[in-house]
Image (spheres, rainbow, N blue to C red):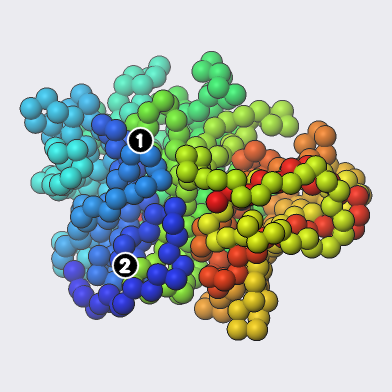
Amino acid sequence: MTSLNATPALDCRYRPKWHYAAERNWLNDPNGLVYSNGVYHLFYQHNPLGDVWGNMSWGHATSADLLNWDEQPVAIPCDEHEAIFSGSAVVDPLNTSGFGVGGVAPLVAVYTSAYSPASPLAGRQAQSLAYSTDDGATWTKYAGNPVLDRASADFRDPKVFWYDGDAGSYWVMAAVEAVRHEVVLYKSDDLKSWEHLSTFGPANATDGVWECPDLFELPVDGDPGNTRWVLVVNLSPGGIAGGSAGQYFLGTFDGVTFRSETTVTEGMQTDDSRMPDYGWLDWGRDYYAAVSFSNAPGGRRLMIGWMNNWQYAASTPSQGWRSAMSLVREVRLETRAGRPALVQAAVDPFAASGTELFAAGPAPLADGVRWLPVEASGDVLRIDAEFRPGSAGKVGLVLRAGEADGVQERTVLAYSSVSGESLSGELSLDRTASGHVGFHADFPSVERVPVSLDGSGKLRLTIFLDRCSVEVFAQDGLVTLTDQIFPAESSTAVGLLAEGDGATLVSLSVTG
Ligand code: FRU
């Protein structure tokens, strides 16, 4: 490791309350998400020596409730031969790997070795193992590494799961050939020797490298007899809002081949007009490298994304620490508009400890901005709002509003109807005047996503504010929008917004 990026003093201005950030230094992708013996493990891409990317190692945090995280010592440090890039971790209850001792199931991490010039494998990326026989506290690299080497410079981010189906029972690895826009699938009986199964891609969004895949099965509407497989493919740049984003495909997996039912465009041609037709995990700028937990109890599929974007991640205004994870999200498949759709709900920080600060509605919403009373303001809030836009052109919320150094700050979440009282419209999140935006030319932005009102003309929004972020779940999690913002601490006002008359605020609840 080099110590070129010596840690500067900590600046905690924007440090989130409920989103995991390393106490010190840089963080990117969530890695090795795994549940074992009552503990959720969050490993992550980490520079232990600086607040920008470098010296990539696996940091580690643990939690019993997915909300309160305890930072642990660095789990897998880089060395002079390899950086430890992204990957996954599994519990190996049958000790297929042979790493277990005394009948205790080992934890096995499968990570990408990014070989440095000092290594005989310099320039390559290959898959390697590390294991823990003390439930994640300490890790040992496998002496036989790498376990899967394709002599490729861009082969990374292995996500491993136990497949148990018609084709048999074995480990499956999904990894990427990043530059070729391929997800490559392999199988193994022992996590050490791998056999190629099939290759998926290029398909849908290909205007950036493919990274951090995931593959899992979910019931549709909770029916175990009707399932789809979800193939997650993160890509950067080329995301729907610009820069980094996660796309997903729905389809089948027979133990060998993933067959997509949601491919819109195939091959490497990019058709910008089709971008909104692809499946997106999030329509904002700051939800990347999202992958799911292995072995989560109750069959829940829980995901975390890195709440940042490679376009400007190195420049965000913090010092001594940089970047946070998203809230944990439970993902499910529900039939919406006649077909299976991915819906997401955050693990709610306020469920156990929140207090309702303000409630309103039903009430007509007149043209203009109506500021909520001061008790409904804050920088760490959950807001639930239900609107019936009616004949109004626009409804929404003004968030984190205030004045700093004589400048008005605000982040605006607005729904605009396409025309008159139709059910289709667009939800937008505007952070162009959200506070500190000038640190990178790509940061000030307006995110837009098509949203339909429900059958009775209503829009439902759940919003989580946490000091430097806005996470929006619209129409019961059908659409999510995640953006970082850097307002002054004093910019905490919340307002209701309407353009034109005829809108109704069906209900509003602010929790803090
Ligand atoms: C995604 C990514 C991965 C890689 C890691 C390196 O953000 O580029 O593909 O493994 O970050 O830190």
**Residue 69 position within the rendered picture, expressed as x and y whole percent measured from the top left:** 34, 49
- Picture residue at 37% right of the left edge, 28% below the top: 297
- Going from N to C along the chain, the mark reached first, 2 or 1, is 2
Residue 294 disc label: 1
Q: Secondary structure at mark 1?
A: loop
- Picture residue at 18% right of the left edge, 29% below the top: 105
Q: Is residue 373 visible?
A: yes
Quadrant in the picture for residue 492: bottom right
Q: Nearer the viewer, residue 276 or 285?
A: 285
Q: CA distance from mark 2 to mark 1?
A: 26 Å
- Picture residue at 33% right of the left edge, 53% below the top: 44
419 sits to left or right of 161 = right
Residue 25 disc label: 2
In the rendered view, would you say 67 is above or below 319? Answer: above
* Tag 2 near tag 1, CB within 8 Å: no
Q: Residue type at mark 1?
A: Ser
Q: Residue type at mark 2?
A: Asn
